[in-house]
Image (tube, helix red, strand yellow):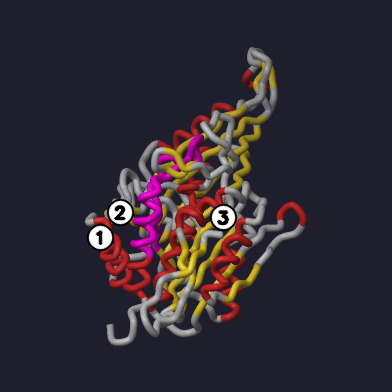
Amino acid sequence: MPAAPATAGPGAPSAPALDPVSLAQALIRCASVTPADAGAQSVLRAVLEPLGFACTDLPFGEGEARIENLYARIGSGAPHFCFAGHTDVVPPGNAPWADDPFAATIRDGRLFGRGACDMKGAIACFAAAAARHLAARGGRPAGSISLLITGDEEGPAVNGTVRMLDWLAARGEIPDFCLVGEPTNVDRLGDMVKIGRRGSMNGSITVHGTQGHVAYPHLADNPVLRLVRMLEALTAEPLDQGTNWFQPSSLQPTTFDVGNPATNVIPARAAARFNIRFNDRHTGESLTRWVRERLDAAGGRYTLDVEVSGEAFLTRPGADVERLSAAIEAVTGIKPRLDTGGGTSDARFIARHCPVAEFGLVGRTMHKADENVPVADLVALTDIYAAVLDAFLPASGA
């Protein structure tokens, strides 16, 4: 068990102290490949409840789509600070590992295992930081601390954070600020905080034509030609030039498929897919209209299917972001860069309800074979999270 008695001064209450490294190992040893939980959230519950957290299991979905989620909270007042994360991990993959990916081996000062940096390590650090913060506050925070932990971040993200937030909203428990423990740092701990993310939209175009012989094109309608014109219309000019906080939006075709094995047949249909990563100048709805206008201008029969997996969002720099940055700098000596790049995360759902930022470990090995994190970074991240809690939930008179 990754808990040990804390040393307390005269008259101070005793409280369990958590070792983030041992807790990270215990979490990694649960092979919680999406959508399996494999006991990971029970491990977390077992260390949070002795701290005084009220833990609520929030399973959503049925059958194979069922996802285990955990909400833990201590305190009932404001401000309400929430840490969000995920215990699910991607599969180990086909590349060889030096050790069992779920053995949580420590070698040469590094902890190896699937989820070490993405993001069981950060969850362990936050739990340890919360234990330290509570011990210094007599077991109760000046406000509320919660953990929003899902098992559905690496998967479809349908029965996880989205539904938990709906549950919180119905209870009037939306946090005042949320920190997501994704591995945001590029080279070293403390170099980057993410305060926003681009939106992502996938599109599928199917152009319908008339099949015929290539020697008699006037008797056919070649959909390949029209699909080429459509893609040219979508990519001829940039969507925008970027903003103060976001890089330019980008539309990238990802497939072009005809499925025609014959060399002398004009096919009846042609299809392509594309992805748009977009900044806060756009929404999924506005981009769908923009795409349709250009496809309509190209002419002919087509069908368009779109799926928006997340809208762009930005938590504008202010007092909360400054508190977070200052806590990171106080521990690491590095003033973190504020950034909005990369892919999507569950922060896109949280941003609909409250201010959110992301900060965790260095992400160089996430999703790779031999995923690992320096043990020293787990200790330092615990120090950072403790400083963040102290900044957001200061003691009376502080």
Q: Amino acid at mark 3?
A: Thr
Location of residue 42 by image quarter: bottom right
Provide the secondary structure element on which disc 2 rests. Answer: loop
- Pointers 2 and 3 in contact (C-beta within 8 Å): no
Residue 372 painted magenta:
yes
Q: Which residue is mark 3?
A: 87
**Which residue corresponds to the image point at 48% horizontal and 58% vertical from the top-left?**
124
Q: Quadrant of the N terminus?
A: bottom right
Q: Secondary structure at mark 1?
A: helix
Residue 366 x/y as whole percent: 47, 42
In this rendering, does residue 281 appear at all? Answer: no
Region in magenta: 357-385
Q: Residues within 10 Å of mark 3 (few under 14, many from 20)?
A: many
Residue 367, given in percent of the width and then of the height, sits at: 50, 40
In front: 330, or 82? Answer: 330
Question: What residue is disc 1 on?
Answer: 329
Relative horizontal placement of residue 229, taking residue 269 as reference (left or right): left
State the separation of the CA atoms marked 1 and 2.
7 Å
Q: How far apart are labels 1 and 3 at the CA level?
A: 27 Å
Farthest residue to the right: give it: 63
Q: Compared with residue 97, is residue 339 higher up or lower down, i.e. above or below?
A: below
Marks 2 and 3 sit apart, C-alpha to C-alpha, by: 23 Å
Q: What residue is at 42 percent from the left and 56 percent from the top?
A: 282
Q: Nearer the viewer, residue 177 or 70?
A: 70
Instruction: Tell me whether the residue at label 1 lies in contact with that at label 2, contact meaning CB atoms closer than 8 angstroms.
Output: yes
The residue depicted at 39 percent of the width and 36 percent of the height is 236
Q: Position of residue 71 (x, y in %)?
A: 58, 69
Tag 3 or tag 1, which sits nearer the N-term? 3
On the rendered structure, is 58 left or right of 356? right
Residue under numbered circle 2: 190
